[in-house]
Amino acid sequence: MKKLAIFASGSGSNAQQIAQYVAGNQNIDLCMILTNNPNAGVIDRTRRGFDCGVNVPVLVFDRPTFYQTDRISQLLERQEVDLIVLAGFMWLVPPALVKAFPGQIINIHPALLPKFGGKGMYGHHVHEAVVAAGETETGITIHFVNEHYDEGAIIFQATCPVSPIDTPDDVAEKIHALEYTHYPRVVVEVLDRVPMRIPY
Ligand code: GAR
């Protein structure tokens, strides 16, 4: 059995898609949802069992805990988490956590990296920038996480067209559709490949 933990800061619609995709899979345990945002929609979604009857604990943490202690990392290690999935998580992952989970943290970015990535490029800001730049194509990037925003090795990309009349909201809708189609499947593929964690 491989263990999955999801970090999310907002609505959590991607977290929900993943939770529903792995529900009932005997080889995968979605063991924890973590969020930095006490008002995040993902908390309600988790408490509703992601509308598929799964019971997953949700942990809310603050900035000092995340950046000045190793409590989150220790918790994930104690739980023997195999893969950490960022699904709309807006804080930079601290270097100590990256080090503790080498090749075991992945992120989804709502653009075709290296375009429209880096600090400040998240959520709706990305779609606004894509439209402002007159792009004719955008997409999603799933990548490993390192110490820098949006710079780890790319695992998968998928594209969609941007028409001249598309608003940032239109782009967001297309991106979400791409994310829901691909992220759950890629998460499971990566999870299949990560070696089992050896507990201390
Ligand atoms: C998603 O589109 C995700 O790609 C993006 O935030 C959205 C979260 O939606 N992530 C980033 O911008 C990370 N830099 P959700 O909360 O409904 O899953």
Image: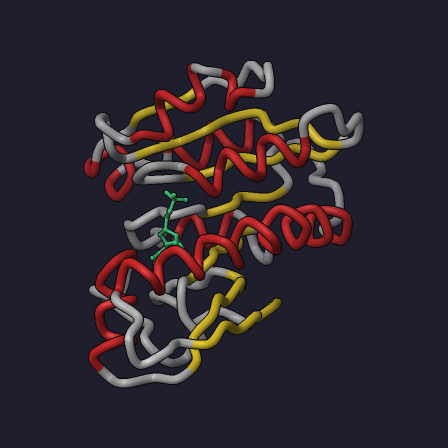
Quadrant in the picture for residue 43: top left
Q: Nearer the viewer, residue 175 or 34?
A: 175
Q: Is residue 116 above or below residue 43?
A: below
Instruction: Please say which color scheme the image uses.
Output: secondary structure
Place of residue 194 in the rendered image (x, y in percent of width and height, measured from the top left):
72, 51
Q: Residue at the spot x=37%, y=23% of the render?
A: 59
Quadrant where the image shows the C terminus: top right
Place of residue 171 in the rendered image (x, y in percent of width and height, measured from the top left):
35, 64
Looking at the image, residue 75 sits to the left or right of residue 102; the answer is left
Looking at the image, residue 10 sits to the left or right of residue 31; the answer is left
Q: Residue at the spot x=32%, y=75% of the render?
A: 116
Quadrant in the picture for residue 114: bottom left
Q: Is residue 111 above or below residue 32?
A: below
Quadrant in the picture for residue 165: bottom left
Q: Is residue 105 above or below residue 3?
A: below
Place of residue 104 in the rendered image (x, y in percent of width and height, measured from the top left):
59, 51
Q: Nearer the viewer, residue 133 or 165?
A: 165
Q: Nearer the viewer, residue 172 or 142?
A: 172
Place of residue 94 in the rendered image (x, y in percent of width and height, measured from the top left):
34, 52
Q: Residue at the spot x=73%, y=52% of the render?
A: 189
